């Protein structure tokens, strides 16, 4: 999306504002499909990345299905028009009642621990199909906070507990239709996926009724120009070849599933904010924005890098280094040491790569409103979330007057 469109949107809808480029989302979906032309693949969008129901609706219209991690996400998916058979609930240490709730709606459930497997067996036996999430003990992910497949991770059933898994599967005659793993986020090295896939292929041979293998999400996207990303074409070729070999050995053609979050929506998103204050400190110049970690926590939480563009000065050369900070009463760094054109109070900045884990991680901390959201698709702009008001902050609060 070009800078002048973004600037106009800031003018029309105000700031802070999340903007999503629906055409970019479509491009990413096509890129993923295009990397696996000869394989039956299914994209299960990991909607935790961005659960706006209009974004979900766009995904659905483009033939993408959905992976949810809570019953609430399941209900949002229903609202967006998904049917139960298009939804998978990947549970992670949840109470068993959440698994029951999703099963009651007819949603396929993915369990990540032996205790849940046993409870499932006791209650449902082989009356429902089931997915099992394994931990392949493969290190993958941009940093430890977003690595989920390694040997110390809480996620999935460690692959070395195969005997216990099989004991429960046999005891309750469980109908295991899929195996799942998600090794981490921001995985740029395709070898990591291939390594984890080998673990899954080997384990899969012990299950007789599989229909799907789910390799999770975690493809790395570019955060700045020239950034290394997962080479999808190379991964597609290599994984397809290995998957075909596996299916031959297994004796049945399975479906290959991915559940990307960031890959589909990160680059589509921009957080637009206004410069409240330019602070010329002796040790550097700060740009204080009308947003902060309450709206985009990734820089503070993960040291995530987000490119920043001054939309009001688009096209002008970078003249100066700035530190971009938020307005929260905390250390609230958004971007450090960025070369930008001379920036003034009132300028509108775009924080890029804000489509994933941006709004969904936003809060009302400092009792501030969360931003509005706009989706632009095929030349049309849609307000997909209204700006909050004080009513939203007060909703559910109970005033006891002492
Ligand atoms: C189970 C599962 N699948 C998929 C994803 C999506 O990861 P990413 O956004 O890196 O593609 C996540 C993210 O945490 C996850 O936990």
Image (cartoon, rainbow, N blue to C red):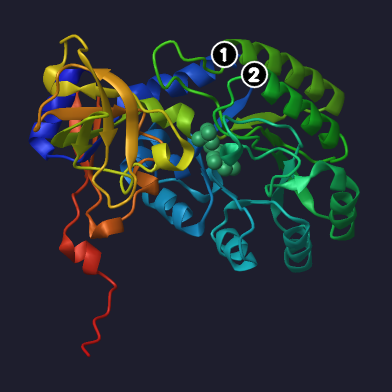
Left or right: 352 in relation to 303: left
Dot 2 falls on a residue whose secondary structure is helix
- Residue 221 lies left or right of residue 154; in this view the side is left
- Side of 286 where 44 appears, left or right: right
Which residue is at 84% across, 27% downward?
A: 251
Q: Quadrant of the N terminus?
A: top left
Please name the residue shown 58% across and 11% down the image: 233
Label 1: which secondary element? loop
Q: Is residue 29 left or right of residue 124?
A: left
Residue at 68%, 50% (x, y): give it. Answer: 154
> In this orientation, which residue lies closer to the viewer: 272 or 248?
272
State yes or no: Cβ of the residue under disc 2 lies below 8 Å from any atom of ligand 1: no
Quarter holding residue 210: top right
Q: CA distance from mark 2 to mark 1?
A: 7 Å
Q: Is residue 47 visible?
A: no
**Residue sitting nearer the eye, 18 or 338:** 338
Write down the residue under mark 2.
Answer: 190
- Tell me, yes or no, whether the two marked residues, 2 and 1, touch with CB atoms within 8 Å: yes
Count of numbered circles on the image: 2
Ligand 1 lies in quarter = top right
Q: Position of residue 392 (x, y in %)?
A: 22, 62
Q: Relative to 248, is 132 above or below?
A: below
Label whose residue precedes the other's in the sequence (2 or 1): 2
The location of residue 37, given as percent across then percent down, is 58, 14
Residue 352 percent across, percent down from the top left: 32, 27
Let me know if residue 278 appears in the view.
Answer: yes
Q: Which mark is residue 231?
A: 1
Q: Quadrant of residue 82?
A: top left
- Comparing 229 with 40, the one in front is 229
Looking at the image, which residue is at 51% across and 55% down? 70
Q: Is residue 311 above or below residue 159?
A: above
């Amino acid at each position: 999306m070009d800078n002048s469109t973004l600037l106009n949107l800031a003018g029309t809808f105000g700031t802070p504002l999340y903007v999503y480029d629906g055409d970019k989302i479509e491009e990413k979906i096509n890129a993923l499909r295009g990397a696996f032309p000869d394989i039956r693949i299914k994209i299960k969008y990991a909607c935790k990345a961005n659960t706006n129901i209009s974004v979900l609706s766009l995904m659905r219209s483009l033939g993408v299905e959905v992976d949810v991690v809570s019953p609430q996400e399941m209900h949002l998916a229903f609202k967006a028009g998904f049917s139960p058979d298009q939804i998978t609930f990947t549970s992670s240490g949840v109470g068993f009642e959440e698994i029951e709730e999703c099963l009651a709606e007819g949603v396929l459930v993915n369990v990540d621990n032996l205790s849940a497997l046993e409870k499932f067996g006791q209650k449902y036996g082989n009356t429902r199909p089931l997915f099992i999430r394994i931990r392949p003990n493969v290190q993958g992910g941009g940093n430890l906070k977003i690595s989920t497949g390694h040997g110390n991770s809480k996620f999935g059933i460690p692959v070395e507990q195969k005997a216990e898994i099989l004991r429960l599967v046999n005891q309750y005659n469980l109908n295991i239709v899929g195996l799942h793993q998600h090794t981490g986020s921001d995985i740029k090295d395709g070898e990591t996926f291939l390594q984890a896939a080998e673990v899954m292929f080997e384990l899969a041979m012990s299950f007789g009724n599989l229909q799907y293998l789910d390799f999770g999400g975690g493809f790395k996207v570019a955060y700045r120009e020239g950034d290394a990303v997962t080479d999808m074409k190379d991964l597609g070729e290599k994984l397809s070849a290995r998957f075909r070999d596996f299916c031959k050995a297994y004796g049945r053609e399975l479906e290959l599933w991915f559940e990307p979050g960031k890959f589909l929506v990160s680059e589509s998103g921009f957080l637009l904010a206004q410069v409240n204050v330019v602070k010329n400190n002796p040790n550097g110049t700060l740009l204080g924005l009308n947003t902060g970690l309450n709206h985009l926590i990734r820089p503070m939480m993960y040291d995530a890098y987000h490119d920043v563009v001054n939309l009001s000065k688009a096209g002008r050369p970078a003249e100066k280094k700035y530190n971009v900070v938020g307005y929260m009463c905390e250390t609230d760094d958004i971007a450090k040491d960025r070369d930008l054109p001379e920036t003034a109070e009132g300028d509108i900045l775009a924080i890029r790569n804000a489509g994933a884990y941006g709004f969904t991680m936003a809060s009302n901390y400092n009792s501030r409103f969360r931003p509005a959201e706009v989706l632009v698709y095929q030349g049309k702009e849609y307000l997909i979330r209204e700006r909050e008001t004080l009513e939203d902050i007060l909703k559910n609060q109970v005033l006891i007057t002492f």
